[in-house]
Amino acid sequence: MFEKILIANRGEIACRVIKSAKSLGIKTVAIYSEADKKSLHVQMADEAVFIGPPPVNQSYILIDNILEAIAKTGSDAVHPGYGFLSENSQFAKRLEEAGITFIGPPVKAIEAMGDKIASKKIAHESGVSTVPGYLGEINSPEHALEIACEIGFPVMIKASAGGGGKGMRIAWDKEGVAEGYQSSRNEASSSFGDDRILIEKFITSPRHIEIQVLGDKHGNFVYLNERECSIQRRNQKVIEEAPSPFLNQNTRKAMGNQAVSLAKAVDYFSAGTVEFIVDSDRNFYFLEMNTRLQVEHPVTELITGVDLVKEMINVADGKKLPLTQEQVGIDGWAFESRVYAEDPRRNFLPSIGRITKYSPPTEFNDGSNAIRNDTGVFEGGEISVHYDPMIAKLCTWSTDRKSAIETMRKALGTFEIEGITSNISFLSAVFDHPKFKSGDITTGFIEEEFAEGFSGVEHSEETIERIASCVTMMHRFSEIRRTRISGRLANHMRKVGNDWIARINQTELNISLDPFKNGCRVKVNNAKELTITSAWTPGKTLAEFEIGGDQMQLRVKPISEGYHIEYRGAELDVLVRTGRQQELGSYMKEKELPDTSKYLLCPMPGLITEIHVSVGDKVEDGQPLCTVEAMKMENVLKASRKGTIKSIAVTPGSSLTVDQVILEFE
């Protein structure tokens, strides 16, 4: 067995590999850039080596720097994680030449399957169902348009060497081809150092389902069932589950057999994933093979009990697979929520900065439910503009899909992150959505169900009443606590009453409380009665309540006269006042927001890569104005109305903060 493994990656996946390596008694080496010197993976590893500045093309994907780190530490094997150099055949070849074991597939398999154009040809020749498309390299926007018209719209334009949603665009018509082609090439070059592009038919109403395969160096293969990855935004997976609620056993077996056949065709070994697109009639078509560990591998581990990282290490060491296809089962149901540093209410734009609070739900497995949280961050750490905005992969498992969803809903409700904005509220909204709960999903789910973006969930009248009642309890308790620490004698303390007015969403509710130990009997609008218990105390940012046997978790932050609440996709300001306070408050004017309609403001921290207009230009609604790069993704900012450009405040190469002025309209 190996003595020391260097992990050629960072963040969550580096931490994940370190855990499995240590469980096998293997020492680990982390590499880090200037931005990552205090990162969690650096702290977890036995050794750590500095490899360069923050940009990945100056650190994490510089092969020579990594080889120097290997030589310096005496590592005898390398695990690449996912992304970065994980599917770079030159990296695997250089390791082989240096006598270092690459914990992954053989070089020829990486070359064959890592190139989307070549992989489609091999899949087609191997009898694997493939999506109609152009099995060649696209060399210009004009060529792209010609091919797109031949295939028929809509088409998918994507990087040949891509992955993780980067370098992918959908063109619905001729106008979208040129922009999609250039953006895909730019992202592909930036992320993978390879700007080759391919085009294929985009199948409408599809489901994205992938098969996990595992092979050894002795010709043994198994497929570890499927993962459904249909909940995507901009081709980036957001929620995954295993198994799929859509497949039947016959389709599962057919897809698994084709995946193994493809792996055998390229003499594959190690873990790999064959991705398929599946239509409404369960016809499936090959998309690509990822010759690496997938981000969503934990859900497969949870339903099969197979530690994929351990098996990758064992296979690289020459060991045979420990199980046959007949021994692969499906135990329960698992979900993975990708928790990102992004703001769903601002079109999911990246959020960077220091994490001032990080309190994930407690991990456990009691045999009927489980929570697993794979992460690479910690409280006090930073989310950098240079890397992927993933904070954690929150996973839940239970005996069936409904129970696994409920476990995830509760886990998301108790996940606390402060300092940066996260997508937890959006994830909660998806898990509460009727179509998702029914399993009626496609890759267009987010675009269709959140067509106008995400502005929060509107809860029912009953839920609003429950939230208002809980917050009123909290407010009363805080007021009592405040009077007791004022230093006054008991007979001079201000009396705290039991009758309040809660104002939430412009609605006023009369709340009467009848307190008892650790709770209250509550009457809402002199009619509805509730019994609520809670162990919450002032200062806690997570408040958990029991209401008639139901559980409710609120993330809370004090504001003037009440609390700011986050609950299952909703953010609410709940004001709690006495009758007199409410009367006086009615005379207060609402604060007016400044008019920014004449300005284009930067919606995220990022780098201006291109300005598409000049001063004096007349622009139309939807016309591109500039391109901002953030976390290796290009974002084209477009005009929201007709207008004339009065001034431009930035130039290409400018580094901007949130809401910084880019240009002004007349």
Image: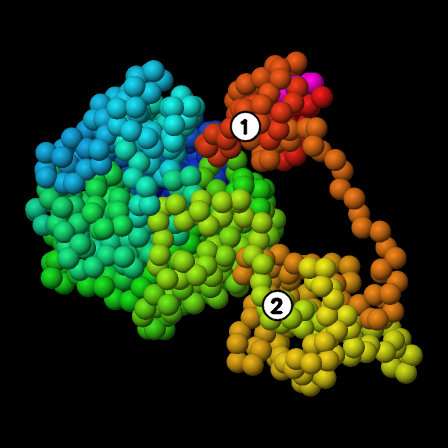
Please, what is the three-letter code of the amino acid marked with disc 1? Gly
Q: Residue at x 53, y 74 (%)?
A: 551
Q: What label sits on residue 517 in the rendered view?
A: none
Task: State the SS at label 1.
Answer: loop
Q: Is residue 218 visible?
A: yes
The picture places residue 204, in percent across and down from the top left corner, at: 32, 41
Q: Quadrant of the C terminus?
A: top right
CA neighbours of label 1 inside 10 A, class few (<14), some (14 to 19), many (20+)? few
Q: Considering only vertical position in the picture, is 217 above or below 519?
A: above
Which residue is tagged 1? Answer: 622
Q: Is residue 474 visible?
A: no
6 relative position to 452: left or right: left
Q: How many marks?
A: 2
Q: Considering only vertical position in the picture, is 524 above or below 617?
A: below
605 relative position to 193: left or right: right
Q: Residue at x 53, y 55 (%)?
A: 425
583 relative position to 543: left or right: right
Which residue is tagged 2? Answer: 461
Q: Earlier in the sequence, mark 2 or mark 1?
A: 2
Which residues make up the magenta segment?
645-650
Q: Residue at x 52, y 63 (%)?
A: 413
| Circles 2, 1 touching at the beta carbon (< 8 Å) | no
The picture places residue 570, in percent across and down from the top left corner, at: 59, 58
